[in-house]
């Protein structure tokens, strides 16, 4: 297989006309990949993506060909996919205010051109989920917010409307499944590609904690930053070490690695209501 792209956390290979997406155990904090892996993270997030793809299949077709027909060395943490012509927009849905959405709201009362009501706090639930797309910047550069009108101008009004509708439906389904299981999915980023016949197909990873904000529902309290379901332990520990948040990051001590691994497992088990390891 030919390595096409090595991201912060995943590696993308071409195999004939297919892609093989491989999730590593790498973990990033403040956008820096730390030198210590979290064992099983790649397998857990791969299993979670597959679980979600099944639960979204009536909303939109997806790129999955096989979770098992992959090289043995990547077994369990790779997905064979259809290689698509990717839509050059990061499709983001937000149901709660946090991160760059909160920054933008505080600066101008809107996110990606969507005006939000006054009085919202860090972590507030929005009156309804909003579509807040960004550009898909090349590695090393920052994605920039774009308005729905910008997406329409670039891709056509019909495509923009389809992307918004599908992104919001995927988010809503994910949120509504996760909430009673104790996880708030505050926002999520999805990517779409086009099949040769032009159909929009859900690609990349979906509704994982690397592509979404997962919060423990029992700790949600608007008015302060929320806890990250899985990475909070690493983030809290990283604040106790002398580190300026630039690469290379510090090695993670074994107790923090194990506690973090347990949180990834807990996210998987809460959502799927099945015991890890996946059967
Ligand atoms: N089915 C697909 N066909 C083509 N490209 C895909 C498909 N699914 C995902 N991709 C692309 O694979 C890449 C995955 O890279 P990723 O690990 O997320 O690294 P990065 O940090 O650069 O985003 C992204 O550029 C994504 O758009
Ligand atoms: Mg990506």
Image (cartoon, helix red, strand yellow):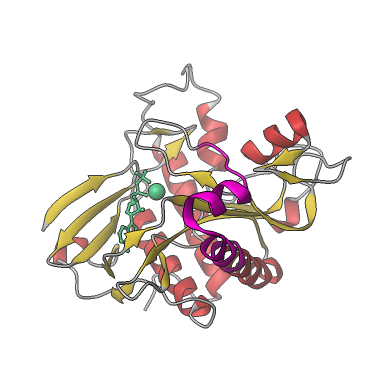
Q: Is residue 57 above or below residue 94?
A: below
The verdict on residue 159 being magenta is yes
User: Is residue 210 visible to us here?
Assistant: no
Left or right of 272? Residue 19 is: left
The one of 222 and 20 positioned closer to us in this rendering: 20
Q: Which residue is at a point 59% across and 64% down the rendered structure image? A: 161
- Residue 25: percent from left, percent from top: 33, 49
The one of 2 and 88 positioned closer to us in this rendering: 88
- Residue 100: percent from left, percent from top: 62, 37
**Figure quadrant of residue 278:** bottom left
**Figure quadrant of residue 43:** bottom left
Q: Residue furthest right?
A: 119
Position of the C terminus, as image quadrant, is bottom left
Position of the N terminus, as image quadrant, is bottom left
Q: Which residue is at a point 43% across and 77% down the rendered structure image? A: 61
- Residue 239: percent from left, percent from top: 55, 25
Q: Which residues are magenta?
A: 144-166
The one of 198 and 239 positioned closer to us in this rendering: 198
Q: Which residue is at a point 41% across and 74% down the rendered structure image? A: 199
- Residue 32: percent from left, percent from top: 41, 31
Q: Main secondary structure of the magenta part?
A: helix
The one of 44 and 265 positioned closer to us in this rendering: 44
Left or right of 219? Residue 228 is: left
Q: Residue furthest bottom?
A: 58
Left or right of 153? Residue 182 is: right
Left or right of 90? Residue 21 is: left
């Amino acid at each position: 297989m030919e390595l096409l792209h090595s991201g912060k956390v995943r590696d993308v290979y071409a195999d004939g006309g297919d892609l093989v997406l491989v999730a590593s155990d790498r973990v990033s904090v403040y956008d820096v990949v730390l030198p210590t892996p979290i064992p099983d993270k790649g397998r857990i997030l791969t299993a979670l993506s597959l679980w979600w793809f099944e639960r979204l299949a009536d909303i939109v077709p997806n790129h999955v060909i096989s979770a098992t027909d992959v090289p043995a060395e990547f077994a369990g943490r790779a997905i064979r996919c259809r290689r698509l012509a990717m839509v050059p927009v990061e499709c983001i849905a937000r149901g709660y205010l946090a991160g760059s959405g909160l920054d933008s709201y505080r600066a101008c009362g809107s996110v990606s051109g969507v005006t939000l009501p006054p009085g919202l706090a860090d972590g507030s639930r929005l009156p309804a989920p909003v579509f807040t797309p960004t550009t898909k910047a090349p590695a090393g550069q920052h994605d920039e917010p774009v308005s729905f009108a910008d997406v329409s101008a670039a891709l056509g009004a019909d495509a923009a409307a389809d992307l918004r509708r599908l992104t919001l439906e995927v988010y809503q389904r994910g949120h509504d499944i996760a909430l009673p299981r104790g996880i708030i999915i505050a926002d999520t980023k999805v990517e779409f590609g086009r099949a040769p016949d032009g159909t929009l197909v859900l690609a990349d990873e979906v509704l994982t904690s690397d592509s979404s904000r997962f919060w423990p529902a029992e700790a949600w309290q608007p008015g302060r930053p929320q806890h990250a379901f899985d990475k909070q332990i690493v983030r809290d520990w990283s604040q106790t070490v002398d580190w300026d948040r630039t690469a290379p990051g510090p090695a993670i001590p074994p107790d923090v690695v194990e506690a973090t691994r347990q949180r990834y497992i807990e996210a998987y088990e809460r959502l799927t209501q099945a015991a890890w390891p996946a059967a």
